[in-house]
């Protein structure tokens, strides 16, 4: 009897070999609190085990690729906010860098470092949500309430830098719209000082917690070769043990000057994904510290954009007193800047994988075609294979650990 | 800002032109990426060769997207492949006629092509032969148009008071 009580249910037969008596169809979503977004899954259930899953997506499709064909380049930045809205600045910076690559704008080092600071903050904000939600879905709400304060604080940093919190529309093509204020720096330094303790507190709640480990280890595991075939990127791929990180493999934005390591998992299960994100947050903090040290060492404290008059708004005093500046201001705001013809693919390591922008310009004022490589659109299609044969409650946990964001999925 | 691996590009082009001399329509390097256009008949063996050749190993399908070329009445597909072993990107393009847009599927090569091809079908109407489940994915099922084609208007189709040519677009 005692033996039976302690048997892990993973050791039991999962896939039933005998002919089942009856299958049930279960509809999960599209608006279900456990899916954290607009996802519908129609599951064929054998008791509590999932036999088959069929996904329906597209509930919040907004046709960004079509809209982008009629927008000047700077007006596409707010569209990218709404892809992965948990880490909007990352998408913004990725888009700016894509256009800069096409135009051949070389950004000053200071802009690169400022961007790295804000991109790593965005990564922390995204991972923090995902990990605390894994806790919530496994029944531990406490950690979520702890970490949400930190996310709130990151949003305050965004607010100091660009004026908005969730959909940031941060930065401009060529740099930032304004320099980081003294208050922003104070907040950044305060965050760096206080966050490691909070993160450790959160990890103490979950990482070696027996219940949490039982719920997550071996749940939704995925082999590395299947993950590559399904186009996994980001923490989900690294949890499977493949060390592909765009920041290291194809460094952009001076990432090659920074010292950090890529955490890897082994089994590609929910626990590994959780732990990879945990460590990535620490690495992000480390990167931010390095960036701040580099910024402190620089004599130049004022440069925050590349001197490219085609995209950077002239200062307001000049606009009001100088005709050329006024003309430039209007040309930029009306989107009357012609972009050289060409095509470019640029990718950044977003919080949930390789976020790519394939931009084709025919020499007009708007892109002739813009395609977003949205990481979760590509890896979410592996979900039926990941949850096949597992229980419903594990499927919920698997989905939240994959960090599928509805806005990015549906674009 | 970005580096061009000219040596690697040359190496890849040489292997490809040795094996697919008739199939390659055009090859160029655009900014930092090698870009190869192949005929639609050869696209499937070409992609398979790129994945399986020991010296190339483009084993990761980064992205796949549709294109519309209204001036030549063609629809196209652009594949971005990444060789994780050699850290090299390649862009493969192919095109088909607008009147009969049929292309072979890449799902037999990369399972991740499944949804990307569905998306391309959804927005451009390209029929991928051999695809296991080619139905609309992001748009509603009973939609009849293919919205990312250039002739599909962004604004309400019934309106006549808006003339985009006035805005230089």
Image: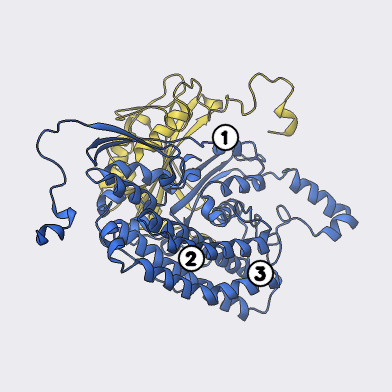
Are labels 3 and 1 assigned to the same chain? Answer: yes
Q: In this rendering, does residue A309 appear at all?
A: yes
The colour of chain A is: blue
Say if A369 sits above or below A159 in the image: above
Name the residue at 56% across, 46% down.
A82
Say if A31 sits above or below A81 in the image: above
Q: Tell me, for residue A406, which label it has, or none.
A: none
Q: How is the image coloured?
A: by chain
Residue tagged by mark 1? A66
Q: Give the mark toward the camera: 1 or 2.
A: 2
Q: Quadrant of residue A322?
A: bottom right
Q: Earlier in the sequence, mark 3 or mark 2?
A: 2
Give coordinates of residue B100: x percent, y percent: 42, 20
Query: Foreground residue, A133 or A366?
Result: A133
Q: Quadrant of the N terminus of chain B?
A: bottom right
Image mark 1: chain: A
Give coordinates of residue A340: x percent, y percent: 63, 45
Q: Quadrant of residue B118?
A: top left
Residue tagged by mark 2? A146
Residue tagged by mark 3? A184
Q: Secondary structure at mark 3?
A: helix
Name the residue at 31% across, 30% down.
B131
Are labels 3 and 2 assigned to the same chain? Answer: yes
């Amino acid at each position: 009897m005692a033996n039976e009580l302690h048997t892990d249910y993973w050791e039991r037969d999962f896939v039933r070999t005998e002919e089942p008596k009856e299958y049930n169809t279960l509809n999960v979503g599209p608006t279900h609190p456990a899916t954290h977004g607009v996802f519908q899954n129609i599951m064929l259930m054998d008791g509590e085990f999932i036999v088959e899953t069929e996904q329906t997506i597209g509930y919040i499709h907004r046709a960004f690729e079509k809209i982008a064909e009629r927008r000047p380049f700077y007006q596409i930045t707010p569209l990218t906010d709404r892809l992965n809205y948990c880490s909007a600045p990352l998408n913004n910076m990725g888009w700016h860098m894509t256009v800069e690559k096409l135009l051949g704008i070389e950004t000053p080092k200071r802009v690169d470092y400022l961007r790295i600071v804000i991109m790593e903050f965005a990564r922390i904000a995204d991972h923090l949500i995902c990990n605390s939600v894994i806790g919530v879905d496994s029944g531990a709400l406490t950690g979520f309430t702890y970490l949400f304060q930190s996310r709130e604080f990151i949003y305050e940093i965004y607010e100091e830098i660009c004026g908005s919190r969730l959909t940031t529309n941060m930065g401009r093509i060529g740099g930032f719209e304004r320099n980081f204020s003294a208050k922003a720096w104070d907040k950044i330094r305060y965050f760096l000082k206080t966050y490691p303790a909070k993160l450790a507190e959160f990890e103490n709640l979950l990482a070696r917690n027996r219940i949490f480990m039982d719920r997550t280890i071996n749940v939704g595991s995925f082999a590395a070769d299947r993950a590559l075939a399904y186009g996994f990127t980001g923490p989900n791929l690294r949890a499977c043990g493949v060390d592909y990180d765009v920041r290291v493999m194809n460094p952009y934005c001076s990432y090659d000057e920074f010292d950090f390591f890529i955490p890897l998992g082994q089994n590609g299960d929910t626990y590994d994904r959780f732990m990879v994100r945990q460590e990535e947050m620490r690495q992000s903090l480390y990167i931010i510290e390095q960036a701040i040290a580099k910024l402190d060492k620089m004599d130049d404290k004022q440069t925050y954009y590349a001197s490219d008059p085609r995209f950077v708004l002239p200062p307001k005093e000049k606009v009001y007193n100088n005709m050329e500046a006024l003309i430039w201001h209007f040309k930029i705001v009306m989107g009357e800047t012609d972009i050289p013809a060409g095509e470019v693919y640029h990718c950044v390591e977003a919080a949930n994988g390789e976020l790519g922008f394939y931009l084709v310009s025919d020499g007009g004022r708007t892109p002739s075609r813009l395609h977003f490589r949205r990481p979760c659109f590509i890896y979410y299609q592996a979900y039926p294979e990941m949850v096949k044969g597992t229980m419903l409650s594990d499927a919920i946990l698997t989905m939240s650990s994959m960090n599928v964001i509805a806005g990015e999925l549906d674009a | 800002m970005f580096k061009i691996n000219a040596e690697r590009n040359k190496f890849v082009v040489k292997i490809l032109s040795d094996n697919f001399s008739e199939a390659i329509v055009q090859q160029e390097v655009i900014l930092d990426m090698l870009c190869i256009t192949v005929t639609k008949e050869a696209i499937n063996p070409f992609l398979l060769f790129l994945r399986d050749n020991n010296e190339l190993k483009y084993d990761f399908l980064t992205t796949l997207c549709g294109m519309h070329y209204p001036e030549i009445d063609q629809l196209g597909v652009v594949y971005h492949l990444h060789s994780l072993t050699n850290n090299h990107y390649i862009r493969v393009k192919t095109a088909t006629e607008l009147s009969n847009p049929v292309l072979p599927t890449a799902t037999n090569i990369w399972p991740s092509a499944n949804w990307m091809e569905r998306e391309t079908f959804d927005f451009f109407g390209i029929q991928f032969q051999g695809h296991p489940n080619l139905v609309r994915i992001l748009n509603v099922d009973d939609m009849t148009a293919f919205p990312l084609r250039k002739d599909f208007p962004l604004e309400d189709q019934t309106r006549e008071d808006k003339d985009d040519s006035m805005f230089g677009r």
